[in-house]
Image (tube, rainbow, N blue to C red):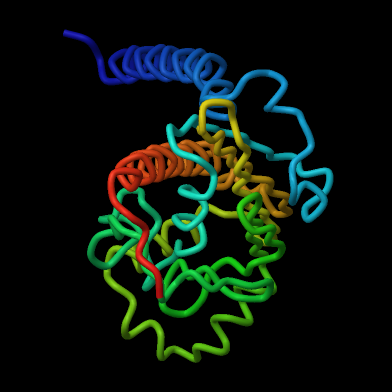
């Protein structure tokens, strides 16, 4: 029988070996998977070409571009973007995570008016501010630490009572994971393609400070992959809705 000290030593070696294997495996996955989710659906030229909103958060250390091709013209895609938001048409992603109820499956005329300075809500107390808008071409959303704080102060706790449990849980997770200070631009660009089709390009640019905390170094990659999963679902959701919408007329106010 092994003595206690020998047993502990061997367990220590085993633990170190397992941890090393997991670290190497995680590194291998990170190296192979991360470039895929940062550039999902795009070709090399799309990944680096200038887009509206790039100047909102310049020199961003985090910049991710995704895209889908939609068998519908830009005029049939744009209305789905304008009406996005919690309490509006939704985000067309995994509703159990970011919505109360389901995202809309039709164009909602009451949410088709959008202007610079408006908010695309992510929860009852606030969300992304519209930084730039070019009808039928580009929608640029923006959020930073000061804006998030001012929205929280304006809500003064009243919005928390109406925030669904799923959003409260998600907000707590992101609050624990995100750096202390951040600024993010989120652009949706609609480009026409031959054959009455559309290229929908999404670009996220983020700059931050305070990301050197131990839990940030561990949690930010996980959070980044979670964002990719949600946005991929969103782009596919917009595509399916726009293509289905071609089969029925768009309602007018």
Instruction: Work out whether residue 66 or residue 179 is closer to the camera in this orientation and state it.
Output: 66
Residue pushed farthest left?
Answer: 1
Q: Is residue 19 above or below residue 137?
A: above
Quadrant of image for the N terminus: top left
Quadrant of image for the C terminus: bottom left
Q: Is residue 105 above or below residue 8?
A: below
The image shows residue 204 at horizontal and vertical percentages of 63, 45
Instruction: State which quadrant residue 98 falls in.
Output: bottom left
The image shows residue 125 at horizontal and vertical percentages of 47, 80
Question: Which residue is located at x 41 percent, y 91 percent?
Answer: 158
Is 132 placed left or right of 21 in the picture? right
The image shows residue 218 at horizontal and vertical percentages of 53, 39
The image shows residue 116 at horizontal and vertical percentages of 68, 71
Question: Which residue is located at x 35 percent, y 68 percent?
Answer: 168
Instruction: State which quadrant residue 11 falls in.
Output: top left
Question: Which residue is located at x 27 percent, y 20 percent?
Answer: 4
């Amino acid at each position: 029988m092994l003595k206690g000290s020998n047993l502990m030593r061997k367990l220590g070696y085993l633990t170190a070996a397992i941890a090393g294997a997991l670290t190497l495996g995680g590194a291998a996955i990170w190296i192979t998977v991360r470039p895929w989710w940062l550039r999902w659906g795009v070709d090399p030229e799309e990944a680096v070409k200038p887009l509206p909103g790039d100047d909102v958060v310049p020199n961003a250390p985090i910049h991710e571009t995704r895209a889908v091709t939609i068998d519908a013209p830009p005029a049939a895609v744009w209305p789905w973007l304008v009406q996005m938001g919690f309490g509006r048409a939704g985000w067309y992603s995994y509703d159990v995570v970011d919505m109360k109820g389901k995202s809309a499956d039709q164009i909602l005329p009451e949410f088709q008016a959008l202007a610079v300075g408006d908010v695309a809500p992510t929860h009852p107390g606030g969300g992304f501010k519209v930084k730039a808008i070019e009808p039928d071409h580009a929608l640029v959303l923006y959020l930073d630490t000061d804006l998030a704080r001012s929205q929280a102060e304006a809500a003064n706790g009243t919005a928390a009572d109406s925030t669904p449990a799923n959003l409260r849980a998600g907000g707590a997770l992101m609050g624990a994971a995100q750096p202390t200070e951040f600024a993010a631009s989120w652009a949706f660009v609609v480009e026409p393609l031959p054959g009455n089709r559309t290229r929908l390009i999404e670009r996220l640019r983020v700059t931050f400070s305070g990301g050197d905390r131990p839990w940030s170094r561990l949690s930010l990659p996980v959070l980044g992959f979670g964002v990719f999963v949600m946005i991929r679902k969103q782009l596919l959701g917009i595509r399916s809705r726009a293509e289905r919408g071609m089969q029925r007329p768009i309602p007018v106010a």
